[in-house]
Amino acid sequence: MESVDRKPSAETEALVREVLERVADKWTLLVIEELGGEAGPRDVRFTRLLERVGGISQKMLTKTLRQLERDGLVTRKVFPVVPPRVEYRLTPLGESLGAAVCGVWEWVERHKDEVRRHRGTYDAARS
């Protein structure tokens, strides 16, 4: 049977663009990494995420977590205590996204010296 190349639907193309935009932003992968990591998914308090994802503001972490929750990539659990305690966890869908983009981390690890060398050569040629 012959394979037929079919153009994805406009809806699929739009969702691919949205997911790429999400994982390509500055914070999403760092948050996913912190929630998953090598030990696997775990519950992480908001304040711990704020500490561990260096340089992120409270406002940006809140925004990032809301987007991830909306997409079904994380769950949010609120504990009825004072002050409020909130924990986040990767869903199976979030774990699968983390695994899919894990290759980027591995690629960087393998090629970081080469990329730095090329950047140095490029920058030196333009100074």
Image (cartoon, helix red, strand yellow):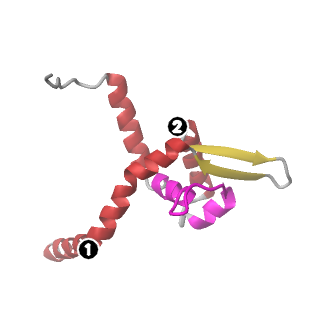
Q: Earlier in the sequence, mark 1 or mark 2?
A: 2
Q: Residue 55 shows which numbered tag?
A: none
Q: Position of residue 43 (x, y in %)?
A: 66, 55
Q: CA distance from mark 1 to mark 2?
A: 34 Å
Q: Which residue is mark 2?
A: 71
Q: Position of residue 38 (x, y in %)?
A: 50, 63
Q: Position of residue 122 (x, y in %)?
A: 17, 71
Q: Residue furthest front?
A: 1
Task: Residue at 57% x, 44% y: name it.
Answer: 91
Q: Which residues are magenta?
A: 28-52
What is the three-letter code of the residue carrying label 2? Answer: Asp
Q: Position of residue 56 (x, y in %)?
A: 55, 60
Q: Is residue 33 above or below residue 1?
A: below
Q: Would residue 47 appear left or right of 54 to someone viewing this image?
A: right
Q: Tell me if residue 40 is in the magenta stretch.
A: yes
Q: Would residue 88 appear left or right of 78 to someone viewing this image?
A: left
Describe the element under mark 1 as helix, strand or loop.
helix
Q: Residue 116 shows which numbered tag?
A: 1
Q: Residues within 10 Å of mark 1 (few under 14, many from 20)?
A: few
Q: Residues within 10 Å of mark 2 (few under 14, many from 20)?
A: few
